[in-house]
Amino acid sequence: MPYPESIVGFGLRLAHLPVLVPYFCYGASAITAVAQVFFEKNALALTPADAASIAFWLGLPWSMKMVAGVASDAWPIAGSRRGAYLLLGSASTLGGTLLMATVVGHRDTYLLAMVLITVGFMIQDVVADALSVEVARDDREIAQLQTWGRIALLTGGISVSYLGGILAERIGARGTFAVSALLPILAAASAAFIRVREDAPRRVSAAPSRRNQLILAGGVAYALLGIALRASGAPFAEEMVLVVSAVVLGVLLRWIGLSRGILIAAVAIFVFRATPAVGQGYSFWAIDRLGFDERFLGLLGQISAVLSVAGLLVFKKTISTRPVSFTLFWITVAGAILYLPSIGLFYGAHEWLGVSARTFAVIDTTISAPLAQLAMVPMLILIARSAQPGAEATTFAIMASLMNLALSTSQLFTRYLNGGFAVTQADYSNLGRLMITVGLIGLVPLLMLPTLRRAERSAGPAPQAAEPLAAARGNPAP
């Protein structure tokens, strides 16, 4: 069929919908965020360390995106490299969502359902990543589509964050998950608009390369290893899976031939994303001690989502044109400073100032929320600049897998800290010290910046946002 030229506004075309709709649906999955917190707290009675452990396993599918990427690049289903995989991912998310809405009542079935949801969104994301390169006419359009993709994701969160709190309050967690089943159906519908440029690189072959076969076989083996370790309850299962993931990704990064500058930038972003969080203990404490209910947590999520988009729009040119070291430096420092009010809330700073805890939380969220997404843009541009013609899904997936492995690492460290400080639903006394420790560890990425800055200087000026991929085909340089 001919490449569609229909303009839908703001420089967007109908061919962009299969890129933007899956991003939007993933963002809109925030509709279940509040319900998930209360489900973990009340229905499953998880400790914060347990919640971090589950979050670790849910992060692993995102760290193995290259398996879906290779499959989508080299193994078409019924002749389709993208549409069939978009439908497959939507079906997985729908299945997990329906399980959450009906039968889940134990932490193992909860993990199974959430893994299905996560794997489904991961596959949809792989397809959208690849299409963002294939449907664009030039490098400028790729950069614009990456930015619009991020805005679509955040817009999805904006549209449902407060609604999710209301639904969790009125119809409960299961009802909220039932409503969210509409999202994978919408993502599947966008497959009807998939059209690839006639001159887009193609690698559909009856005999996929040995490299692709090895990646797929390794990914399947990795998945089986993870399942076996989790099912057996083996000690240090999470640590073993993390080490295997790092080794596999290290080999794959050598295969795609990253330049030294991009590799250093990737490591710096990895360290930034791998720093631990406080975990669900803070949310549980706010519910139990401050009386934050579903509706109010939804309101905080709504404020955060709106201001994240505002921050992205205001600063997108700066963070797209300045070096990665510049963005990571000021986001790290500002994030540490803006984290102080959260610590202050635990120690009663709102009482010293004569304001209610809810007012203090709203002010804190309003100040800190714009930072939430800014670090993502340099990462996305870095990944896009590494995309190799004909293997877009694979290249995107390998680089993104490294970044998402950092989030699993973060959850593992979060579990360690929650266990070490013994934060439970019965005892929040050490939560303040945990928060201070997390805040200090959050400054660790600053140690990477001198090395990163030297690499950027030796490589020359960073490319402008208008031409982010011009020199990035093959063996890219920053």
Image (cartoon, helix red, strand yellow):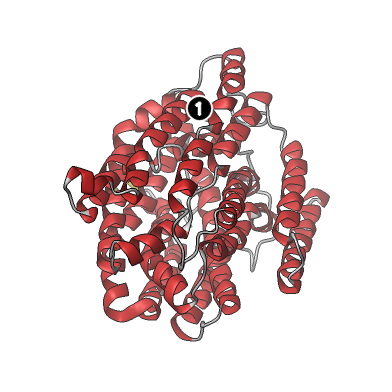
Relative side of 232 to 14, left or right: right
| Observer able to see residue 305 | yes
Of residues 224 and 450, the one nearer the viewer is 450
**Where's the C terminus, which quadrant?**
top right
Q: Position of residue 151 (x, y in %)?
A: 35, 46
Of residues 438 and 125, the one nearer the viewer is 438
Of residues 154 and 108, the one nearer the viewer is 108
Whether 87 is drawn above or below 387: the answer is: below
> Of all residues shown, which one is farthest toward the left?
354
Near mark 1 (Cα within 10 A), the count class, few <14, some 14-19 or many ≥20, is many
Q: Position of residue 148 (x, y in %)?
A: 37, 44
For disc 1, the marked residue is 324
Instruction: For mark 1, give the secondary structure.
Output: helix
Whether 237 is drawn above or below 94: the answer is: above
Q: Amino acid at mark 1?
A: Val
> Of all residues shown, which one is farthest toward the bottom?
103
At x 26%, y 78%, the residue is 170
| Observer able to see residue 11 | no
